[in-house]
Amino acid sequence: MRLKLHFIMVILVAIIYMLFINYYVLNMYSELSTSDLENYQNNMELHFNWFSNNDFASDKTSIFYHILYLIDLTFKYISDKEFSALLFVIFASPVFFIYTLTAGIPNSKYFLITLPIVFMLLLTPRVIELFAAVIRTGLAFAIFYYSTQLLKGYRKYIGILVSVLIHMSMLPILAFYLFYYFVRKVTNIEFTFVTLLVLFLFSIAIMLGLNMVNPAGGNSFGLGYKAITFCLAVVFIFFSAYYSALKSVEGFVGIGLIFLILISFIFDYNLIRYIAISTIYFTTYIINTKRTAVVNLYTIAYFPFFLTYFLFWVR
């Protein structure tokens, strides 16, 4: 009975979040002529025309649009087929994400304890944008996150491969994920300055690789935005020092990604999309500790970041 109640609560949160994105956020983005949402619609029309003419090789990187085309064929009775397929992905990604995020919650009591931090995480602007604006990245991440957290064996590797094929932005996350197991195999992970330094240097290596392989436009974020990101990194490091976050793959990946974002500011390289994924992974670590005191402390520490960022976004 408790398991059923817990599952119902999780699904309820997922549905509410889904409706929030649909009725409020998508309306905002759909009104912007330069938004990613319009770009996706235009690209879908182009790819669907190719596919309907049995041309499946015009774009070698279009697996995302292949998936949407299959969804479109499934729901072909809907009049606005292109947009309905896109909405299906927008709906499915948050459900996968929320289900995975809360999978480590053992009971309804602990669910209520973690509810404030889950609520703040879901309303963090970059997390909202991950599923409502950069939709392809959101789908790729939802599959990657679900695969690495809940799947085992060959299913995990298939899920990771599919996520990378949908969007190559999963490769830096995968690099940190694999590096964690490499470090754990070579040495016993403890909080030490050396361990953080190695992770920081690895982040620099990834940044240099990204800069060579895929030069991107500079970021336009102000000093205040960068200061907020730095403060969040300090929070992560604090929990590494006192609660052994580096022993967890989620904590390790979260800290690695926040290092990568800070380094991108120096290199004038736009990687701000990873702040949502970094926060999600670190919050997953916090939830998975199953320690009420740790969850409450992190909730308090995260609140100023959330409030500042949210007020800046709605303004």
Image: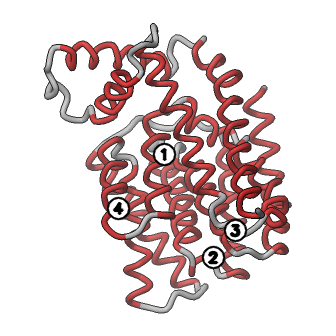
Q: CA distance from mark 2 to mark 3?
A: 8 Å
Q: CA distance from mark 4 to mark 1?
A: 29 Å
Number of numbered discs visible in the structure rendering: 4
Q: Nearer the viewer, mark 4 or mark 1?
A: 4
Residue 255 percent across, percent down from the top left: 57, 66
Task: Classify mark 2: residues with Cα within 10 Å, few (<14), some (14-19) or many (20+).
Answer: many
Q: Can I make out residue 224 in this image?
A: no
Tell me, yes or no, whether the two marked residues, 2 and 3, touch with CB atoms within 8 Å.
no
Task: Compare marks 4 and 1 and give the one earlier in the sequence.
Answer: 4
Task: Compare marks 1 and 3 and give the one earlier in the sequence.
Answer: 1
User: Which residue occupies the extreme top position in the image?
Assistant: 79
Task: Compare marks 2 and 3 and give the one earlier in the sequence.
Answer: 2
Q: CA distance from mark 2 to mark 4?
A: 27 Å
Residue at disc 4, secondary structure = helix
Task: Classify mark 3: residues with Cα within 10 Å, few (<14), some (14-19) or many (20+).
Answer: many
Report the residue marked by disc 1. Answer: 271
Tell me the kind of residue under disc 4: Arg
Report the residue marked by disc 4. Answer: 155
Q: Quadrant of the N terminus?
A: bottom right
Q: Is residue 104 left or right of residue 55?
A: right
Task: Classify mark 4: residues with Cα within 10 Å, few (<14), some (14-19) or many (20+).
Answer: few
Report the residue marked by disc 2. Answer: 245
Question: Residue 286: which disc?
Answer: 3
Task: Classify mark 1: residues with Cα within 10 Å, few (<14), some (14-19) or many (20+).
Answer: many
Tell me where residue 181 sits by quadrant.
bottom left
Q: Residue at x 75, y 50 (%)?
A: 9
Residue 194 percent across, percent down from the top left: 52, 84
Q: Is residue 239 above or below residue 97?
A: below
Task: Compare marks 2 and 4 and give the one earlier in the sequence.
Answer: 4
